[in-house]
Amino acid sequence: MITDNRLAIFVALADCGSFTAAARKLSMSQPAVSQNIAALEAESGGPLFTRSTRSVSLNERGRIFYDYAKSILSMYCEMQDALSGATPEQSLLLPLGEGRSARVKVEDGELRIALISSNN
């Protein structure tokens, strides 16, 4: 699937609440997650998370960024569906939390559900 990995990493970190948990979930190293988040924060003009010694949480800028990131990732799924011939009426993206969503669509008269994680 076409996606922006840095947005997916950002969403996973926001959902997991720690760099270590996000790295584990994404099958990445913790430094790789940190580097991607640092790049996003530099490009967006400032911090997106409030950090403590054990966890991270979204700050006000991060909450705004999160909403847009989720929408953009959803649009990638919609684009993939359109490229594969599915129409918006045939497909629905349901956020499940923790960086996961479900794509629900009717195909050949059957209901199909595909689970999607942000590490795809």
Image (tube, rainbow, N blue to C red):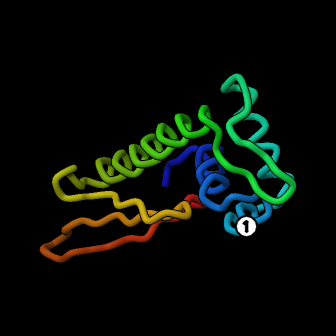
Horizontal and vertical percent for residue 53? 87, 55
Query: Residue drawn at (75%, 27%), measured in percent from left and top?
Result: 42
1 left or right, relative to 105? right
Horizontal and vertical percent for residue 69? 51, 41
Image quarter (top left, top right, bottom left or bottom right) of the C terminus: bottom right
Query: Residue drawn at (64%, 44%), measured in percent from left and top?
Result: 58
Query: Residue drawn at (76%, 34%), measured in percent from left and top?
Result: 39
User: Under tag 1, what secondary structure?
Assistant: loop
Of residue 59 and residue 99, the one placed in the foreground of this image is: 59
Work out which residue is located at the far left of the displayed protein and give it.
Answer: 109
Q: Is residue 68 above or below residue 43?
A: below
User: Where on the picture, by quarter, is residue 72?
Assistant: top left
User: Where on the picture, by quarter, is residue 40?
Assistant: top right
Number of other residues with Cα within 10 Å of mark 1, as a class: few under 14, some 14 to 19, many 20 or more: few
Work out which residue is located at the far bottom of the displayed protein and give it.
Answer: 110
Query: Residue drawn at (73%, 33%), measured in percent from left and top?
Result: 47
How many dots with numbers? 1
Q: Is residue 104 above or below residue 17?
A: below
91 left or right, relative to 18? left
Q: Is residue 47 above or below residue 22?
A: above
Of residue 105 and residue 50, the one placed in the foreground of this image is: 50
19 left or right, relative to 15? right
5 left or right, relative to 89? right
Type of amino acid under label 1? Ser
The residue pinned by badge 1 equals 27
Horizontal and vertical percent for residue 35? 81, 43
Horizontal and vertical percent for residue 48? 68, 37
